[in-house]
Amino acid sequence: MDSFLIRGGHRLKGTIEISGSKNSALPIMAAILMTEGKTTLKGVPRLLDIDSMTRLLVELGCQVHRHEPADPGTVVGPALNGPLDIEVADERQCEARYEIVRTMRASICVLGPLLGKRGKAVVSLPGGCAIGDRPVDLHVRGLKKLGAEFRVENGNIIGEVRGRLKGCRMYLGGALGPTVLGTINVMCAAALAEGETVLVGAACEPEVSDCAEMLNKMGAQIKGHGTPEIRIEGVDKLHGTEHRVIPDRIECGTFMIAAAITNGELELKHCNLDHLIAVTDRLEEVGVKIERKDGSVIVSAARRINAVEMTTQPYPGFPTDLQAQLMALLCLSDGISVVTERIFPDRFLHVGELNRMGAGVRKEGPTAIIQGVRELQGANVMASDLRASAALVLAGMVAKGTTRIDRVYHIDRGYEKIEQKLAAVGAQIERVKEEKALGSLSAVA
Ligand code: EPU
């Protein structure tokens, strides 16, 4: 497993191109299972999770082809990625096997499309993960309301439809609010159901809207996406289309924090700041300067930041996927900050690692109390999940000395070429293959 070696203390300055959204691309790829004819996706990032979804779609009878990039000389940025063609060739296979599901929980996205189109789905139950329990009861509840029948057998969830799914009005919220992938699963299945479905308590995340937009281009009739009430008039079939996935708002937010934590200045290109309104609000509150330019944003911070309170919430609130990264920044604030996690109350594995770097974070239930310190120190730390790993990269870039982050495959799941993007704007960060990582830290002298 690779590691990162980071030598802290370098201000970031320059331009970074934001990649297409992982969390948009994954369910969108799964939704293509419902179509006839070829779909071409643009802006799909090159990531481990995208590779896993590709493998899953191939097992489910799709032909997937990645075109060569328009400009093969480009190291990072959208030109790195040629379009992705996906076409269903064989509809007989309906199983998402444990071997793939265990590497990527988003495999659950195939449940709704398979039931809607093939009438059967066998998906290995995802189980818990580093950020806490990840139940799929709301996905199942919604699909049952459309008429699917479910049973659990040998760790698999097996769904079947007699005849065709039937639209209805349903409430989709759960104890911790709406579900993003659950909304997408039910919305996909309802797109091919008979009659009208109304999803009340739907997730409003931009990734839900992006999927709805693509389905509409394929012939679906979906309205109200982006609001808590989505209306879907079922259609008989969906056809192939061309679609560009939205920019990755979490990658963008991570680099905004990278500019702030290093007292640097970054221009982030190809982003949509409208998707980051709560993040912009919190960053401006702590003293970060954010200037919009056409399709890009310039982020800078010239001094020590203020402490702040923040609670993660469903969109348009502050995203849970940026909680760890903001916490890394707040570790260096002037005062005491309070961060409460309302989406995944156990998503705090980064706290112990940040404290190993000299941070002053105390956890009380779903809340972390952060006493700002003047500096962090480099240490050997362990990446535990995707966003926690990003927080450690941020902390490492500002810590005194060298930080070694082990198990960076977590970060490879969701950040495209992060070390190359950061190195290009002045970070001293190097990927070290397993054997070398066990050796000397002088690799980043
Ligand atoms: N929940 C239930 N029952 C369900 C589904 C969800 O109780 O059937 C609970 C969850 O346990 C959680 C809350 O509802 O407490 C919200 O979970 P949600 O279903 O919205 O999460 P998700 O759809 O599985 C997506 C992203 C996550 C992101 C969350 C929240 C993808 C592939 N994953 O997961 O992204 O944290 O929405 O915004 O889109 C990441 O990228 O690092 C990541 C974890």
Image (cartoon, rainbow, N blue to C red):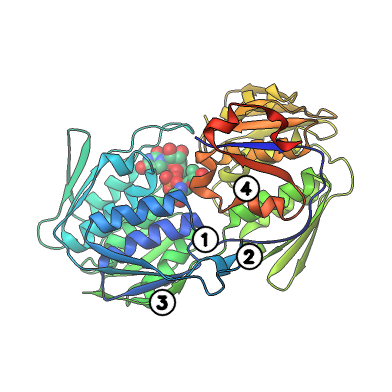
Q: In the rendered image, which residue does mark 1 sit on?
A: 206
Residue at 61% across / 62% down in the picture? Answer: 75
What label sits on residue 272 in the rendered view?
2
Q: In the rendered image, which residue does mark 3 sit on?
A: 242
* Neighbour tally class for label 3: few under 14, some 14-19, many 20 plus, Cα within 10 Å: some
Q: Disc 2 vs disc 1: Cβ atoms closer than 8 Å?
A: yes
Q: Please say whether residue 344 is visible from this viewpoint.
A: yes
Query: Between residues 108 and 435, which one lies in front from this camera angle?
Result: 435
Q: Secondary structure at mark 2?
A: loop
**N-term-proximal mark, 1 vs 4:** 1
What label sits on residue 318 in the rendered view?
4
Q: Secondary structure at mark 1?
A: helix
Seen in the image, is 24 located left or right of residue 431?
left
Asked where in the image residue 202 lies, by quadrant, the reply is bottom left
Q: Label 4 amino acid? A: Phe
Estimate the spatial distance between the alpha carbons at disc 1 and disc 3, rounded to whole Å: 18 Å
